[in-house]
Image (tube, grey):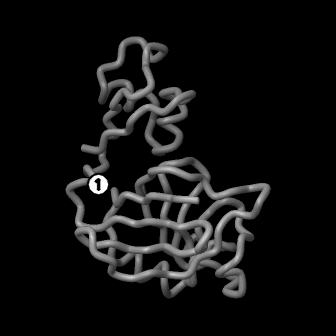
Amino acid sequence: MYQHIVRPGETLWQISEDYRIPYTTLLQANQIVNPNLIYVGQAVTIPGLPNPDLLPYSIMVSISNRTLTLFQNGAVVKTYPIAVGRILKQTPIGEFVIINKAPNPGGPFGTMWMSLSKKHYGIHGTNDPSSIGRAVSRGCIRMFNQDVEELARTIPIGTRVSIRP
């Protein structure tokens, strides 16, 4: 089971939204009687997600280098070029996990969408390959379609994604 560590300012409602699970499911899974009594540093179980520490893969995103690096058991497998959020809509910094995958999402998201554990953010393809390498997205991590498809075939749901400045 995946354990989310409560950050300053977070509420259980926000956590349920970020992980796209029903609020009542989150309360039941954690046997929380009073949702107003959560605290920073508290571990909250997210039902249905594996523990990322037990998975062989992890991802590190460098916003400044505009790269996404895939690791397997701590060793670099491949580094991909990416596009990141523009100045007014920056890519979030922190630790996240992949919570779902959606092939062929349509629109500007290219041929694959992988949701991060932060509502409205993901790793996805693009219908504008010339944008890769630039700070142009609305905060998501944009990849060439063939790269995001390869990544999605490789990593399981629950893979840790570390996003750094």
Mark 1 crowd level (few <14, some 14–19, many ≥20, 10 Å Cα): many
In the picture, measured across the screen, residue 147 lies left or right of residue 71, that is right
The residue nearer to you, when weighing 148 against 136, is 136
Q: Secondary structure at mark 1?
A: helix
Q: Residue furthest left?
A: 54
Q: State whether residue 115 is above or below residue 15.
A: below
The residue nearer to you, when weighing 119 against 96, is 96
**Rendered residue at 63%/58% (across/down):** 91
**Rendered residue at 48%/28% (across/down):** 12
Q: State whether residue 86 is above or below residue 50.
A: below
Q: How many marks?
A: 1
In the picture, measured across the screen, residue 44 lies left or right of residue 21, that is left
**Rendered residue at 57%/84% (across/down):** 144
Q: Residue furthest right?
A: 88
Q: State whether residue 152 is above or below residue 54.
A: below
Amino acid type at image mark 1: Pro
Residue 119: x percent and y percent?
Answer: 57, 48
Residue 130: x percent and y percent?
Answer: 71, 87
Residue that mark 1 sits on:
52
- Image quadrant where one finds the C terminus: bottom right
- Image quadrant where one finds the N terminus: top left
Residue 92: x percent and y percent?
Answer: 60, 53
Rendered image quadrant of residue 46: top left
Rendered image quadrant of residue 41: top left
Rendered image quadrant of residue 97: bottom left
Residue 155: x percent and y percent?
Answer: 33, 70
**Rendered residue at 60%/66% (across/down):** 63
